[in-house]
Image (tube, helix red, strand yellow):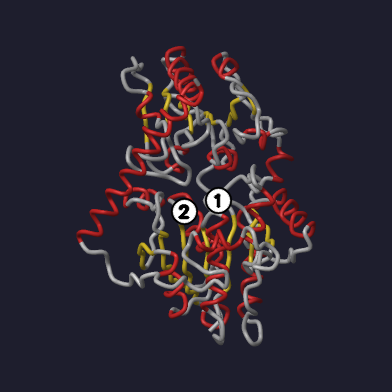
Amino acid sequence: MPASATKSLRVAVLADSDTRWKWGALTAQRLAPADAEIRLDGYLLRGRATPTARQLKEVGVRADSLREVTGVEFLRAMGEASYDVLILALVGGGVQAMLHGLRAAWAGAGKRPLVVTGYVGVVYEKLADGLLLRHGADLVLANSRHDADRFRAVYEGVGADASAVTEVALPFLGGAPYTGEHEPYTVVFAAQPSVPDSRKDRTYLLNRLIEHARRHPEREVLLKLRSKPGEHTTHIEELPYQKLVQGKDLPANFRLVYGHMGEVLDRTDLLVTVSSTAALEALHRRIPTVVLTDLGVREVLGNHHFTGSGCLASWDQLDAGHRPTADEQWVSRQGVAADGTYATAFDTARERIAELLDRPGGLPPLTPYYTPETAPGYLPGILARHHLGPDGVPLPGVPAADKEPGPVRQIVRRAARGAYRHGVQRVAPVIRRMGEL
């Protein structure tokens, strides 16, 4: 029965990393009506970035059930289960594969869940590619008015239906507004796994952070890390700051910290980053925020997204005591909702979900923009990576894998992941350096 009739909502979230699980699970909570009970079942797509138990705990969202699956396992589960809403918190290729797989799995079914997808943060690269891979979901969530306008322009520009685009806000904003300096004054650098990506640039940022701590012994300077050694996140981290900091003479007021970003922001007086979504979390709470220009303002860094924000500054300026003031107009267009409108940011999406779930006769089949006819040289490869044929049906010979892996399979899987991570963190950088000689 629709959520509007039963006051309950059954939601499934499929995620392929810690950040996307956080986005998907929190989005599920935001989309549920205030007076509805929500049952949340989590499915973690098996791969290099499958979240660890620590990463899942750090998100702070409790699921009623949680299990690791392959793409084919998930599709089989969706063919049997009964949900109101399904949230695909995946990379673009994963979303496209699941859309085609779900279309095949639900063929001939009476009713199907409403399918939602979107982005976990700032969209600053591969806009057209990522959007068209997400086309076909019933709702494509845009985290700001700025993104909603861009999303619609891309879809309309290729002749695709843009009605699925729905403006919301980042689901993980919140926390108490900043009221003034703490004792001690605390500077937090929010590290990113892949930005910047070179040893030289990452070492430069680390050295400047350490030097800032030395220049200001009265301040507490924190390096906020996303993952512990051996863990992977949404993006590959070849050069963890934990390794770069080894052997350095660190001042007493400098520390490495993990944990929930919201808890770290509770004691932050100045948030510094290259382009992390943490900047938007801080701006929502009106915490002074700096997006660094030391390495340039470049698309590859993502800090170009913050042009016009009033937050761009360098370490030299910060060392000299600069405190930025965010541009209110820019902030309001970015879904940060620092003006108190965050409480209503998801109202439109909730209304659309209620309308679609009440649609007479149920929802029509999923209709992605990409088909074997419109993208015959692109789509089959995307589907094949998830063991699906051009029609979205699992390829012959794909195992059911419905049972829990045995001890041998678990050992092999751990070894494979370890080899992959060794290749990413040790071998790949060496090969890259050799290529630069």
Residue 287, compared with residue 164, is above or below; it is above
Circle 1 SS class: loop
Residue 22 tag number = 2
Identity of the residue drawn at 35% across and 64% down: 67
Amino acid type assigned to the residue bearing label 1 in the image: Val
Question: Furthest-left residue in view?
Answer: 407
Circle 2 SS class: helix
User: Which one is nearer the viewer's eye here, 407 or 4?
Assistant: 407
**In the image, residue 335 lies at what x, y percent?**
65, 48
Residue 46, compared with residue 188, is above or below; it is below
Q: Residues within 10 Å of mark 2 (few under 14, many from 20)?
A: many
The quadrant in which residue 299 appears is: top right
User: Which one is nearer the viewer's eye here, 241 or 102?
Assistant: 102
Identity of the residue drawn at 46% across and 43% down: 262
Identity of the residue drawn at 43% across and 37% down: 237
**In the image, residue 23 lies at what x, y percent?**
51, 54
Is residue 344 something that shows in the picture? no
Amino acid type assigned to the residue bearing label 2 in the image: Lys
User: Which one is nearer the viewer's eye here, 279 or 411?
Assistant: 411
Left or right relative to 217: residue 87: right
**In the image, residue 177 lies at what x, y percent?**
55, 41
Residue 414, compared with residue 109, is above or below; it is above
Residue linked to disc 1? 120
The quadrant in which residue 92 appears is: bottom right
Is residue 136 something that shows in the picture? yes
**In the image, residue 110 lies at what x, y percent?**
56, 87
Q: Earlier in the sequence, mark 1 or mark 2?
A: 2
Q: How far separated are the C-alphas under marks 1 and 2? A: 8 Å
Q: Is the residue under label 2 in contact with that under label 1 (CB below 8 Å)?
A: yes
Left or right relative to 76: residue 27: right
